[in-house]
Image (cartoon, rainbow, N blue to C red):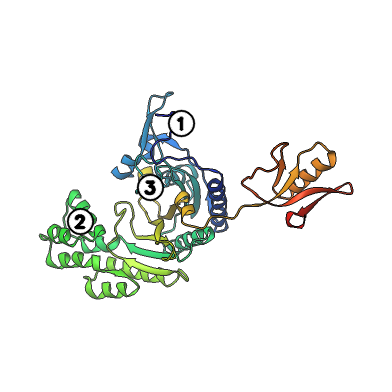
Amino acid sequence: MSAWVLPDQIADVLPSEARHLEELRRSLLDGARRYGYELVMPPLTEHLESLLTGTGEALDLQTFKLVDQLSGRTLGLRADTTPQVARIDAHLLNREGVTRLCYCGPVLHTRAARAHATREPLQFGAEIYGHSGLEADLETIELAIQSLALAGVGQITLDMTDVRIVDALLHGVALTAAQQVDLHAALGNKDAAALKRLTRDLPEAVRQALCLLPELYGDAQVLLEAEKRLPRSPMLDSSLSSLKWLAQRVGPVTTTFDLADLRGYAYYTGMRFALFGGDGITQAAQELVRGGRYDEVGAVFGRKRPAVGFSLDLKELVQAVQPQPLRPAIRAPWGEQEGLRHAIQYLRARGETVVCVLPGHEQELNEFHCDRHLLENDGQWVVESISKS
């Protein structure tokens, strides 16, 4: 095998896509800053026990391990940034009030999340610590929607659920950890046959409610159906009321509900949402953002704080939007004349891209769209449109 062949589902990012990724990164971080989020940059690697504390088996299996040559301890390459940000909030910042943090950096997965996906996502995320109210949930969703809008995603759909709905239905029911895993998997897959089998020994009201959940997906009517057909309880009523409140305030996006979607049930503690983008004509809608409330995330670091946030993969996002046009640039001759060098420096200081044409390469194309050129006119260097020459 050639030495320069990369591992499966690991790839170089070439100029056009790299430029688009970097512009998106800057745009999304600037958008988060306008909401008051502070940028943090956790390390790519940590001691394994710190990196995986409280994250569960799924993230453990996604994490590459290596041995530190200095200490002999096992290190991990992060597969998700959220646990690191929770550690920063709990131990380094240690603030009493609300903390808003954002980040953007690579993560590495032992296996890709889906076919044809990269194993090295560029993860962007934003999180609020210290506020347990719906106001923080709403801000998180709004920022996530704005992030997709900044990237140029069309036809955004918000899909919501709340993991407390199933918790309410199972309240007082004794299930082993394995039974819970199987039950949540059957609900997530909408596997009616498996649900009937797994719930056959449960109380009749609970069995009927759980078997009904896979049918409760669609528009806001779903919440009304849930109120009518599910056994009422304070936790259930609170969950449905919260979903209604959020849906009424998120703005002009299509909003749907899927009360049996329990992906990440062991991680989330309340509202969970996903954002889908795509026009449904030239491309199918795909999940681009995942987020929700995870109030237990800091407990393993000795400081349990309310937390809500979201994350997305910029590499996946850049594939879901139209390519960015080439950046307009100025073509300039190469030369040592003082006036020419001064003119080039002046233009670059003003934010212009000036590409100097090296001798013998006048006809080469490049990543930039040179719509103007720098010409000498009566002893003065001036910029003129190429179309006018």
Q: What is the secondary structure assignment of the residue under circle 1?
A: loop
* Label 2 to label 1: alpha-carbon separation: 46 Å
Q: Earlier in the sequence, mark 2 or mark 1?
A: 1
Q: Is residue 16 among what the camera can see? A: yes
Residue 18 x %, y %: 54, 46
The quarter of the image holding the C terminus is bottom right
The residue that disc 3 covers is: 116
Asked if disc 2 and disc 1 are in contact, CB closer than 8 Å, the reply is no
Residue at numbered disc 1: 4
Q: Are marks 3 and 2 in contact (CB under 8 Å)?
A: no
Q: CA distance from mark 3 to mark 2?
A: 29 Å
Query: Is residue 152 left or right of 82 when viewed as pictured?
Result: right
Residue at 35 percent of width and 73 percent of height: 220
Residue at position x 33%, y 43% in the image: 59
**Distance from label 3 to label 1 (Cα)?**
20 Å
What kind of residue is marked 2?
Answer: Leu
The numbered mark, 3 or 1, whose residue comes first in the sequence reads 1
**Amino acid type indicated by mark 1:** Trp
Name the residue that disc number 2 marks: 183
Report the residue at 26% width, 58% height from top.
Answer: 188
Q: Nearer the viewer, residue 346 or 160?
A: 346
Specify few, some or many for label 2: CA neighbours under 10 Å numbering under 14, 14-19, or 20 or more.
Answer: many
- Category of crowding for the residue at label 3, using alpha-carbon neighbours closer than 10 angstroms: few (below 14), some (14–19), many (at least 20): few
Give percent across and percent down for residue 255.
39, 69
Q: Quadrant of residue 288?
A: bottom left
Q: Which is nearer the eye, 353 or 246?
A: 353
N-terminal label among 3 and 2: 3
Q: Nearer the viewer, mark 3 or mark 2?
A: 3
* Residue 81 in the figure: left or right of residue 190: right
Local packing at callout 1 (Cα closer than 10 Å; few below 14, some 14-19, many 20+) is few
Q: Nearer the viewer, residue 242 or 21?
A: 21
Secondary structure under badge 3?
A: loop
